[in-house]
Image (spheres, rainbow, N blue to C red):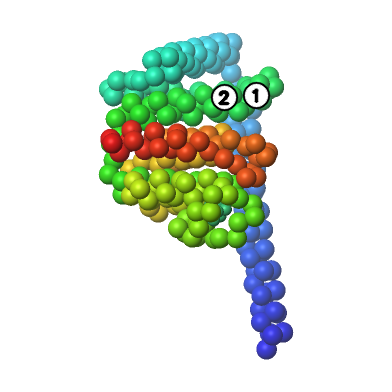
Amino acid sequence: MCRAILWDIKLLKVKNLNKSFKAFLLLTGLSICIMLSALAVLSQLYRYSTKNAYELILLILMMLTIIIIMLTAVSTIAVYYAYSKGRVGKAFLWLPRTGLRLLLPFIMPTAKLLSFDKEDVRRFYIDVNNILVRSGNISCEPKDVLLLLPHCLQHSGCWYKITSDIRNCRKCGKCCIGEILEVAEGNGINAAVATGGTIARNIIFSSKPKLVLSVACERDLASGIADVKKFPVLGIINERPNGPCNNTVVDVDKIKEQLEEVLGN
Ligand code: SF4
């Protein structure tokens, strides 16, 4: 009986492997076909093109470059304005918001290329995002707020399964989860602990809060904010006195302040 089951599992694995391998072959085959078609079109253009055609292509490239430079300049000014003022009028919120989304994909590779500290860039992104979320004057009912916490805030020696339900915490005081739980219960908001980015996103998409108050490191916060565009996220960066992902801490007063603001207490 057991052998039969094991055999079935093996067969299933081979079947799955074949399925993924087929998909891989199909996609690579299609990609090669698309590239060959592009090569055929380019070779025909090369064969029959004139000097005027080359000049036209150069002109189009120049125009595109000018448009990109103008968009980058406008985005930079809009983001700078939001950051320096600390608030943006509701009617103009879309401008720095779009600017931030346009600039980030350019800035991150440039920062990597020039060996800039990427954490600084992410911190700036989180700060500007918080300003934009606050500028939207979001005022929520407690039930519409989700407080999302990283698993690394829990003391590494604690056995209580707070990832399935944060209320399993015994508030022993060894880590800040107990104090945060008291704040969440006191304000009547939902709180959850996520073990990773995918789970955090799933929690947000399934609970559909009006506002997410999220504690995480710069990298997780920046990528999370960018991934759940539909949901406003106020980010609070955790501190890592023991290195990344190990017994991290957060200033609970910052959580209280943010909650007071969004709940209008
Ligand atoms: S406060 Fe809660 S989560 Fe932290 S160690 Fe104590 S029981 Fe565990």
The x, y position of residue 261, in whole percent, is 33, 33
> What residue sits 40% from the left and 25% below the top?
131
Q: Picture coordinates of residue 26 (x, y %)?
A: 62, 53
Q: Which mark is residue 121?
A: 2
Label 1 Cα crowd, 10 Å radius (few <14 / some 14-19 / many 20+): few
Which quadrant would the C terminus be assigned to in this image?
top left
Q: Looking at this view, name the residue that lies furthest to the bottom.
A: 1
Reply above or below: 236 against 113.
Answer: below
Residue kind at label 1, given as amino acid type: Asp
Image position of 255 with respect to 154: above or below: above
Question: Nearest the camera: 32 or 17?
Answer: 17
Pointer 1 and pointer 2: residues touching (CB < 8 Å)? yes
Q: Is residue 21 visible?
A: yes
Question: In this figure, which residue is indicated by the disc labeled 1?
Answer: 117
Is 92 situated left or right of 247 in this image? Answer: left
At a point 69% along the width and 85% down the height, the residue shown is 2
Q: Position of residue 263 (x, y in %)?
A: 30, 38
The amino acid sitting under disc 2 is: Val
Position above or below: 226 against 196: above
SS class, disc 1: loop
Q: Residue at x 35, y 29 (%)?
A: 134
The answer to whether the beta carbon of the residue marked 1 is less than 8 Å from any atom of ligand 1 is no
Q: Nearest the camera: 265 or 16?
A: 265
What residue is rendered at 38% in x and 15% in y? Answer: 85
Viewer can see residue 201: no
Percent of width and height locating residue 222 = 52, 34
